[in-house]
Image (cartoon, helix red, strand yellow):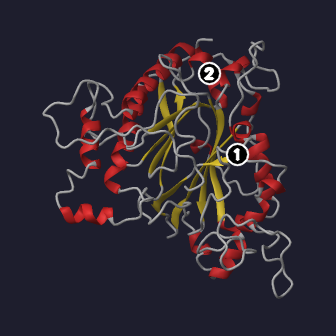
Amino acid sequence: MADQSIPETRTPRREESLPAEPPAGVSRRTLLGTAAASGLVLGAAGGAAGYAAAPAAATPLTSLGTGQAMFHGKHQPGILQALQARGHLVAFDLTAGAGRKEAAALLRRWSRTAERLMAGEPADSADTGVALDAGPSSLTVTFGFGHSFFTRTGLEKQRPVALDPLPDFSSDRLDKARSNGDLWVQIGADDALVAFHALRAIQKDAGSAARVRWQMNGFNRSPGATAHPMTARNLMGQVDGTRNPKPAESDFDERIFVPAPDAKDTQGTQGTQDPAWMANGSYAVVRRIRMLLDDWEQLSGKEQEDVIGRRKADGAPLSAPADGTETTEMDLEKTNADGDLAVPINAHARISRPDQNGGAAMLRRPFSFHDGIAADGTPDAGLLFVCWQADPLRGFVTVQRKLDRGDALSRFIRHESSGLFAVPGGAAEGEYVGQRLLEG
């Protein structure tokens, strides 16, 4: 997504040839990724020339395996990274008898596995080998806690107020069995096998401490599939994510991440209702939003654009001139030749604008999904909506309430599952995710 920041990546140095054994500290998977990046596995000069002819800004597909996100850091991975080609969202419930001790051991296992896999290493000695030939492929693994987790572990006093259940909305058709959960894991990668490998490893690590409550699979366009980097499209064919907050904006951290408490504020309540263990974390709202594509595709192109408020071809607002782009500022007062508003009053892009919602903002980082054809012949497809914010009441809830009162897009979507999770800040070297909560 063009509006997302690109994280610091660690790309292995390209070599003229591969040694028989990897150098110390370099994984075989990373070494193989280096070979792919240098063109050694293309097998033909014509293939390499084809990539060389592409615009410099494009990501050559042969380099995808070398991308590496860092596990340790101020924030957990999987928030600031660009959209990933493949994703898995999975929620777990702690099993009967499992409590705080078992949860701590589980997060320790999960963190160790995530760190190894994100570095391109096998999960452990019993690794399945599914991703044996691949590099890290920008794998990210993110962990969060649901409202019920704190009751199950006796940590109710540490539960953030921001985790209060989301209100009901008119477009909700929620399946409780596919909503919420004690624990939530987000997995993303630029290779489907690498992503599946991580999902399988995380599931195996759960052992007897937790069982899967629900799991969903998603996808996005692969990096390098377009002539130049651009904002993604959703399954309705619309450019989606134009006005995402950008890390370069002065108030980005304030809107997306929970601030660290003042050094004198040991309870973490000065200026915020968040406990200290949530410092540098964020809140993820997860919604499975089914798109009624058969109904949507019956609309003309002009009707679709009026619903969204943007041109389908380039994402420019309907108020923009012919040479406008998706970043052209929307003119909410502009009228067309008939005297009607160029951007209809109920257009999705108009209603969801931050300046129409008291400045409410959230960092959207979704995946599309397609789970086959339903019994009535309609596609079970849509958006695995994931958004990040420092305060879900001021972020998602504020915007969704506004959309609920008259968004033209509501006729063509259905919210079928929902979850809200507290995602703590990143783990420091030697720590596991959630350690400050579980051992504090």
- SS class of the residue under badge 1? loop
Q: Is residue 189 above or below residue 54?
A: above
- Find the distance from the CA under tag 2 to the CA under tag 1: 39 Å
Quarter of the image for the N terminus: give it: bottom right
**Along the viewing direction, whichever of 417 and 362 lies nearer the viewer:** 362
In the picture, measured across the screen, residue 131 lies left or right of residue 422, that is left
Q: Residue at x 77, y 52 (%)?
A: 399
Q: Which residue does the numbered mark 2 point to in the structure image? A: 152
Is residue 417 visible in the rendered structure shown here?
Answer: yes
Q: Which of the numbered marks, if any, corresponds to residue 249?
A: 1
What amino acid type is highlighted by mark number 2? Arg
Q: Disc 1 residue type?
A: Glu
Point out residue 245 in the picture as x, y percentages from the top left corner.
68, 49
Mark 2 or 1, which is nearer the eye? 1
Q: Nearer the viewer, residue 326 or 266?
A: 326
**Residue 177 placement: quadrant:** top right
At 56% from the left and 69% from the top, the residue drawn is 237
> Position of 223 compared to 384: left or right?
left
> In the picture shown, does residue 97 fall above or below 178?
above
Whole-percent x, y for residue 179 in the image: 61, 42
Asked which quadrant contains residue 120, the reply is top left
Numbered tag placed on residue 39 in the rendering: none
Considering only vertical position in the picture, is 194 above or below 438?
below
